[in-house]
């Protein structure tokens, strides 16, 4: 038993778990990270990272049979022949969709940090104040000023590229040099910003090392080569992942025990002590059960799996799941509305080109309902867009042959513009997850039932984006504008949040302002499950900052003997 005792246990080694591990290990805590998936060692376990298209049997695309067998994960834009080994296949880990929900997962050391698109924006004060001002969900127990120093802290270590834009809707951070807009994007920026005083076009902020600093070199990471093959794993450590950054850093302290293939079944609660004492684990391969013990437990299994673990952690004291005195565990799940996209052409600039690739794109922070409620829907949306040139084949009109054909494919095609939304959704009690009473997975753990859907607010917000997007593209000089509602299911945004929300009142929330469970103070939840609302920003930078802040608090409480 002694070898199973640690100071801290972290469940999951993805973006938030990696940060918990780094912080706790650096503070001298003997920390066990339990990861349900296989080990993925930086550099060694990126089998496709340097392959060319012709090195793949199907030139990178997935065979039809694989897509047919895995309809959920196949809908994710990043799932292909070069990345498939980092994604969970549908059949391997079933769940029950009461309403359609595309649950995209990465079960391995590093979790989805290997796969993410690395867009990283801070939340601002409008976002934390949103629920209280607009009367939905509950009030956040923290404000931007509470998290601002922690954003700075994680940004410096992770390496975030961006421009200091000076916007109160999207606070600036500790930036490495920004990527550049291309000539068409610059022209669109000028036209949109002179056409709309409340709209700002900026370059997307992203977790890439455009100019590595000493702290990144110490991590063994080097400059981003803009290969944009990131989701295969980056041998340069050019983008932030747990594998290239937080996990090896934690390992260097000598305090980390990283244990892959360890499926956490539930948290053990000791009624006499009034706290959690450890976790039950099923070996992913042998299915053997074991237990591990620690003074504090960080649950970072990613939003829905964190909900699942807590719902499955039942005891005499907590018959409906750990800390679930108010019955709200698993409820108020929210996500981002990505349904709207637009596409257009752009005349001119045909004598100009852009060189190389770029791992980000221009964006427009939310401009709806910012200062006050103005629209017939709550909250708003971030807009991402980019301009590029069609492939040379687009110059061929069908019956060209010989020299004419060769000349045509030696020139890039004309310019196109694509635009997408990232809309805030309103957390509702009815959008929930719960455990199946009869269906279990291979490891004897109840399957998760997802019951999460869109509502009227989402439809109105989508309608507004499509009409505003069309108007802005037209103002920017685009031609042949087309609009689309993908009608994609929730989940495909891969920004699921909520179910174990923070709050000041234990009657309406599960966690306090330090991410400790109200009813079980030595359990911390710092992944997307803790979120009260979703804002319109990509969420992972906020998960990192919240995790570092909570870990700091956990260590100080531990030192004071309060845990
Ligand atoms: C294609 C793609 C693009 C994305 N783009 C962006 C973006 O641009 N910006 C952004 O902010 N976010 C983006 N995301 C989302 C981002 O990846 C997640 O928000 C982030 O990874 C969440 O961190 P996490 O630690 O909560 O979960 P994860 O990184 O998923 O890590 C969770 C870990 O827990 C493990 N685990 C789960 N259950 C158990 C268990 N029972 N026992 C033990 N271990 C367990 C998992 O195997 C996994 O390793 C994207 C995601 C994808 C897939």
Image: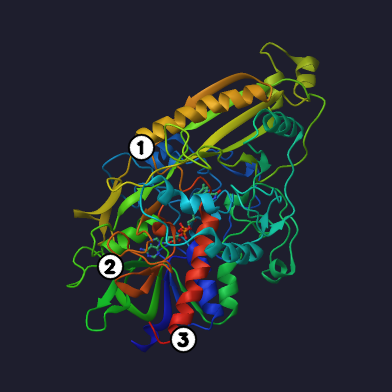
**Residue situated furthest right in the rendering:** 351
Q: Are marks 1 and 3 in contact (CB under 8 Å)?
A: no
Q: Is residue 217 above or below residue 105?
A: below
Question: Which of 482 and 366 lies nearest the eye of the viewer?
Answer: 366
Q: Which residue is mark 3?
A: 559
Quadrant of the rendered structure where residue 383 is?
A: top right
Q: Position of residue 217 (x, y in %)?
A: 72, 68
Can residue 297 be seen here? yes
Work out whether mark 1 precedes mark 3 in sequence or the reverse, and give the earlier one: 1
Residue at 38%, 54% in the rendered image: 498
Q: How many marks?
A: 3
Q: Position of residue 97 (x, y in %)?
A: 29, 43
Question: In the drawing, what numbered circle is on residue 427?
Answer: none
Question: Which of 323 and 1 lies nearest the eye of the viewer?
Answer: 323
Q: Position of residue 471 (x, y in %)?
A: 59, 23
Residue at 62%, 40% in the rendered image: 363
Q: Is mark 3 within 8 Å of ligand 1?
A: no
**Relative to residue 308, is residue 458 drawn left or right?**
right
Work out whether mark 3 precedes mark 2 in sequence or the reverse, and give the earlier one: 2
Can residue 14 be seen here? no
Quadrant of the rendered structure where residue 453 is?
A: top left
Q: Residues within 10 Å of mark 3 (few under 14, many from 20)?
A: few
State the SS at label 2. loop
Q: If the image is split into quadrants, where does the C terminus sit?
A: bottom left
Q: Is mark 1 within 8 Å of ligand 1?
A: no
Question: In the drawing, what numbered circle is on residue 323?
Answer: 2
């Amino acid at each position: 038993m002694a070898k199973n005792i640690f100071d801290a246990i972290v469940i999951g080694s993805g973006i938030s778990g990696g940060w918990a591990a780094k912080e706790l290990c650096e503070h001298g805590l003997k920390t066990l990270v339990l990861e349900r998936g296989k080990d993925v060692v930086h550099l060694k376990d990126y089998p496709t990272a340097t392959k060319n298209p012709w090195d793949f049997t199907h030139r990178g695309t997935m065979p039809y049979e694989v897509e047919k067998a895995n309809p959920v994960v196949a809908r994710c834009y990043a799932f292909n022949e070069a990345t498939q080994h980092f994604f969970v296949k549908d059949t391997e880990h079933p769940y029950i969709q009461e309403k359609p929900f595309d649950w995209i997962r990465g079960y391995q050391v590093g979790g989805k940090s290997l796969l993410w698109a690395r867009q990283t924006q801070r939340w601002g004060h409008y976002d934390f104040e949103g629920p209280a001002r607009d009367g939905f969900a509950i009030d956040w127990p923290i404000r931007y000023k509470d998290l601002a120093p922690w954003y700075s802290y994680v940004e410096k270590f992770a390496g975030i590229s961006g421009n200091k834009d000076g916007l109160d809707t999207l606070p600036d951070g500790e930036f490495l040099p920004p990527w550049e807009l291309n000539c068409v994007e610059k022209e669109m920026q000028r036209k949109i910003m002179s056409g709309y005083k409340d709209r700002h076009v900026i370059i997307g902020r992203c977790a890439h090392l455009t100019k590595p600093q000493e702290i990144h070199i110490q991590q063994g990471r080097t400059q981003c080569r803009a290969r944009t093959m990131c989701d295969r794993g980056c041998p340069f450590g050019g983008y932030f992942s747990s594998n290239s950054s937080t996990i090896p850093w934690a390992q260097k302290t000598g305090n980390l025990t990283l244990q892959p293939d360890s499926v956490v079944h539930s948290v053990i609660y000791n009624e006499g002590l009034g706290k959690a004492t450890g976790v039950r684990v099923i070996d992913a391969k042998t299915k053997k059960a074991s237990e591990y013990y620690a003074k504090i437990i960080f649950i970072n299994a990613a939003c829905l799996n964190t909900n699942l673990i807590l719902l499955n952690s039942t005891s005499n004291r907590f018959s409906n799941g750990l800390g679930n005195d108010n019955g709200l565990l698993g409820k108020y799940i929210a996500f981002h509305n990505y349904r709207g996209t637009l596409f257009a052409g752009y005349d001119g600039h045909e004598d100009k080109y852009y060189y190389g690739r770029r791992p980000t794109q221009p964006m427009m922070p939310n401009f709806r309902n910012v200062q006050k409620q103005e629209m017939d829907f709550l909250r708003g949306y971030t807009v991402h867009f980019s301009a590029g040139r069609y492939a040379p084949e687009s110059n061929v009109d069908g019956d060209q042959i010989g020299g004419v054909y060769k000349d045509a494919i030696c020139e890039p095609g004309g310019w196109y513009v694509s635009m997408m939304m990232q809309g805030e959704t309103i957390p509702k009690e009815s959008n929930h997850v719960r455990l199946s009473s009869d269906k279990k997975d291979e490891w004897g753990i109840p399957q998760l039932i997802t019951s999460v859907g869109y509502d009227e607010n989402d439809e109105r917000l989508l309608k507004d984006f499509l009409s505003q997007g069309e108007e802005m593209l037209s103002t920017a000089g685009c031609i042949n504008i087309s609009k689309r509602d993908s009608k994609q299911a929730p989940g495909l945004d891969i920004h699921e949040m909520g179910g174990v929300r923070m709050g000041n009142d234990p009657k309406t929330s599960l966690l306090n302002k330090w991410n400790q469970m109200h009813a079980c103070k030595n359990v911390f939840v710092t992944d997307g499950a803790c979120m009260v609302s979703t804002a319109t920003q990509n969420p992972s930078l906020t998960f990192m900052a919240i995790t570092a802040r909570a870990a700091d608090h956990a260590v100080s409480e531990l030192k004071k003997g309060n845990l």
